Amino acid sequence: MHAPLDATPLLELDGLTVGIGGDAAPILNAVTCTLRRNEILGIVGETGAGKSLLTKAVLGLVPEGLRVLGGDVRFDGCSVFDRRNEDLRDLRGGKIGLIGTNAKALLDPVAPVGRQIARVLRAHARVGESEAQSRAIALLREVGITDPERRAKAYPHELSGGMAQRVVIAMALVTDPAVLLADDATLGLDATVQAQVLDMLVQRCRRRGLGVMLVTHDLGIVRNCCDRIAVMREGELIEIENVDAFLRGPRQAYSRSLLEAAKARPTPSIARHTASERPLLQAEKLVKIYGGPFTHQVRALDGVDFSIRPRETLALVGESGSGKTTAGQCVLRLTNPTSGRILFDGEDVTDLSAQKFKPWRRRIQMVFQEPYVALNPRWRVRDLIGESFRLLDPMSRGERERRISALLDAVHLPSSLASAFPHELSAGEQKRIGIARALATDPDLVIFDEPTTALDIRVRAQIIDLIRDLQSRRGMSALFITHDLNSVRSLAHNVAVMLHGRIVEYRSAEDIFATPREAYTRKLLDAELPVEDPPGRATNVSEAIAV
Amino acid sequence: MPLAATWHRLPRFVRIILTRLGMIVPQMLGVTLVTFLLVRLLPGDPARLILGNFATDDSIKALKQHLGLDQSLPVQMERYLIAVLHGDLGMSPFTSNPVLTDLAQRAPATLELIGYAMILTVIAAVSLAVISVVRPGGIVDVVARIYGLVAGAIPDFWVALLLVFFLFHILGWAPAPFGRIDAMINAPPTITGFLTIDSVIAGDRTAFWSAASRLVLPVLTIAIVNTGALMKMAQTSFRGAYQSEFVNHMRLCGVPERRIIRSALRNALPPIISQTSFITGFLLGAAVLVETIFAWGGLGQYAVQAVVNSDYAAIQGFVLVASAFVLVVYSVADILYELADPRIQV
Amino acid sequence: MNVAKLSAFLLRRPGALIGLALLLVQIVAILFAPYIASFSPTDADPLSSTLPPGGEHLFGTDELGMDIFSRVVFATRVNLLISFTAVFVSLAIGVPIGVVIGFYRGFLSTVVLRIFDFLQSFPIFVLGMALVAVLGQEIWSVAIVLTLLFVPMFARLVRAEVLSQRERPFIAAARCAGANDLQIMFQHILPNAMTPVIVQISIAIGMAILLTAGLSFIGAGVRMPSPEWGLMVSNGAQQMILGVWWIALFPGIAIVLSVLCFALLADALRDLTDPRLQGDRRARTA
């Protein structure tokens, strides 16, 4: 499946070591690898493995406070660190292009994007402004932006995330570089957009014969785009291997644990309900319209029905703007639906006043998407978890302490963390605190808003295991709001696919994954980049391109 | 909705300016009414003040009737509004001039002072901020840090006195702190009221140098005191932009440093614009201390005199003009702010 | 934060140490003014008018023959009393207003905001003159003028913070835990909104000292013979041109040091109150 590889290395990292110096452990430790022409090398690792620093060091630009302590980076046989200032500038963005994460933050917010692309070109080549502009527009067309003349005049905030990412790719390609460094280039994009952008990027690079370093934390992307994979851990490159061989069986234990964590788990079976069992939660014809009569109206929810029975898990799946988060907020009464009803345990709670709804709060809880921002930064873990005890069931101090450490235990955290502040915790720990907080009232239904986004592979797997474990032990129902199909496979019994505020397909998880009926569902499933072939389906970006 | 469609077809800067102009009218109306009420809260009977303590009750009553002070508040307010619309701000019993004339005579003095001071302040503050952020730990950075701390702590009237003492009394470099132009030199014919500009128009070299040298100390005083605050704001704003991801990305794309600084500064502009407008508005009232020391004869001194004399008409007139000035400054700043930041919806 | 950590914090910041030292000097001046000063601050002595510094009169005397050193020391009481009163009264009024108008964004909040706009854009010295004319030339009039200026400042500051906090997910999370509006406003939002306010308190005290001095300078503040720094500078203003520098110089230095003290303390507080900048950290970059 690989395109023929050029033998001479384009980029050579030779024992590259970067750190603060002195006794401190280096952040990049003796990294050695090569990149050839027409090759896509995937660099995989968890947060703090030094992946991003690697891309910066290759460009000879390490962040302030860090130094290159040893080793060398050679581009076309010449050391990057030897070069004088002007040569280096020519290398950056000229010979070596860089595509970063979170494209919107990488673009100058007050300059039209066409001019920004032209700016990079003019930094490296003697061309006039209008010539540079027309080259930028041509490139915007090439990276798949429709109506590039108009888009070139747009400011970054007027573009979608996917379009901004394409602009950043165009910025990297405009100088015709020989090497492309892509640092988590599709992080945070919707799955279908991610697939399109990756597809386009891989095609361009193959056509131009570039050497590409694709830094990512997603093994699915590596499997579907890369020729070779390099695994990084704590600043060291521990394994470098052809992708096929790696997927058959990594040599290192750490790599194996990564690969294992990336695979989906089978959905836990629940005792099948009798049909007569009453649904715990029913949403009927929910409509939510944002905006007043004089402003632009958005129908965030447009007649949504779903129901969840006791011990059952429903996943609301969709891309950003599909209305899945709004649906969750309506159930929690964080926002009120414009019309429609919400029944909880058979009772209509739609129009209850805040005071009347208070008793229901303890039965419906939510785990918020971004764990850090959902925890008051000035409160200790103890107070965060204990807040609902204080507000809903008054109890003695000792009783509260006991319950708090029981909850910490339930989410596999030591009770010593009770006096920590949120910023002292890792992302995984914060997520667990968020879950413990939701469990505090012993709820019947927990809403999980994107429980697995922005987490490292192994942490994600741990959180999924934790949720599965809690559900089977506590017998609670769950509503999953997510775009991560992998976690849906591992957790949900039923799946509702949402698009533009409507549910387009609503069936059991097995059925929907095996035989998707709607075109949009199929598109979503196709955009998934799994590390293993799900039975019955075999699409693969790089194969499609190789053909 | 054809109107809305036409509106959205207009270029963005036209929409920004039209929106702001539309807002000025009601704001000005509000300011006029509040000014009227506020000044009425001042104690003292204006009629008695004008006529002095020995006036008879009858003559006071007659004067009250003449001034309309015997009418109800809404009627007075209506009269006042109509008069203001006709450009009639009343007479000042102490200068015996129409208030509008008094203000028109004095406004250029204050505006000239504030204008030059703000130009100097902005240039100094932005340059210091940019250099100190681009070269942290350099001489400029250290100087800027110490200055930033101390500048906010120095009272302007004291700086003015020190400058006078050292540059006039000890060194004799600066002219005496007595007015806008040397008493022995004829002022150029009034066109704009700004002596520096008028003397250039008149081609009067001597008058220009005299006026310009008289400006040095007060302008320097205001700039020394206000540059610190603006510099700190500019530093924060510019540092935020200069250390942001997009600037780093530009660097990784090999864009030259000069170009990067320009882009970062362009991004850092909005808060600098607001702060500049805020200082400018504040100075109109605050420059009175400096005006007093340099016997500048500007608006601030006039206002203080009016308060001392309980001169209703003059106070009202000053507050109205001052508010209008602040309103114009803020509106211009808002327009610039919105032009500088394309993310703001218009 | 315990004493050991606090002293470690201070040692790393010479600015904070200088600020504390200056504060200490002022406290001593306030408490022990009669023992430090060798002359009465308000007694004129025509025989020793306009004496240069040195000898019996450390900082010299003014036109009326009052001892400048004694007046500078005693003025600490007047200036800080006015400033602290104005700032803390403004704080008590402004902060709750700010929280409420930030949390509820209705018509009323807009009206309050417009009133603040007007108050703040009003020329401060003219407002000061006018109010002092109404209320009489008492130090309390000065405090009221400053309060009028600072209430909008604190309220706006808090409002801006509340606006940025109220949409944050932990507020929604608190709602889920069963908290009502009041609990959310004062338990969740306010503590997170206080950091800039605490810093601003110190800055405002500095501003208050400057403004008090400015008001007295143009004759809208404290009256002779009360010792007040701005008034003393004003007394020396005319003499300065003639080369009599000591009358205005020393009270001016007192103003600079006093304001500088609170600016330095503000800087230190900014670092101290931010939980993300504190010393003991096991923050793992996650």
Image (cartoon, rainbow, N blue to C red):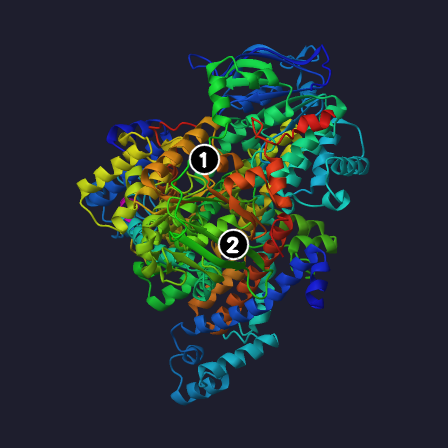
Q: Quick one: A204 or A94, which is closer to the camera?
A: A204
Around disc 2, counting alpha carbons within 10 Å, would you say few (fewer than 14), some (14 to 19), or many (20 or more)? Answer: many
Q: Which mark is residue B283?
A: 2
User: Mark 2 — on which chain does it sit?
Assistant: B
Task: Report the quarter where the C terminus of chain C lies.
Answer: top left
List x then y, in percent, for residue A208.
Answer: 76, 24
Q: Quick one: A522 or A32, which is closer to the camera?
A: A522
Three-letter amino acid code of the residue under disc 2:
Leu
Around disc 1, counting alpha carbons within 10 Å, would you say few (fewer than 14), some (14 to 19), or many (20 or more)? Answer: some
Predominant SS of the magenta segment: helix
Residue B265 lies left or right of residue A117; in this view the side is: left
Q: Quick one: B5 or B278, which is closer to the camera?
A: B5
Give the residue number, with chain letter if any, for mark 1: A267
Instruction: Label 2: state its secondary structure.
Output: helix
List x then y, in percent, for residue A213.
Answer: 63, 22
Instruction: Label 1: state its secondary structure.
Output: loop
Residue range corresponding to the magenta coloring: C70-75
* Whether marks 2 and 1 lie on the same chain: no
Q: What count of labels does the image hold?
A: 2
User: In percent of the image, x 51 and y 21: which residue is there?
Assistant: A50
Task: Report the quarter where the N terminus of chain C lies.
Answer: top left
User: In percent of the image, x 36 and y 34: which residue is there?
Assistant: A469
User: In percent of the image, x 40 and y 27: which residue is there?
Assistant: C284
User: Mark 1 — on which chain does it sit?
Assistant: A
Q: What is the distance, in whole Å, between disc 2 and disc 1 at their CAs?
A: 70 Å
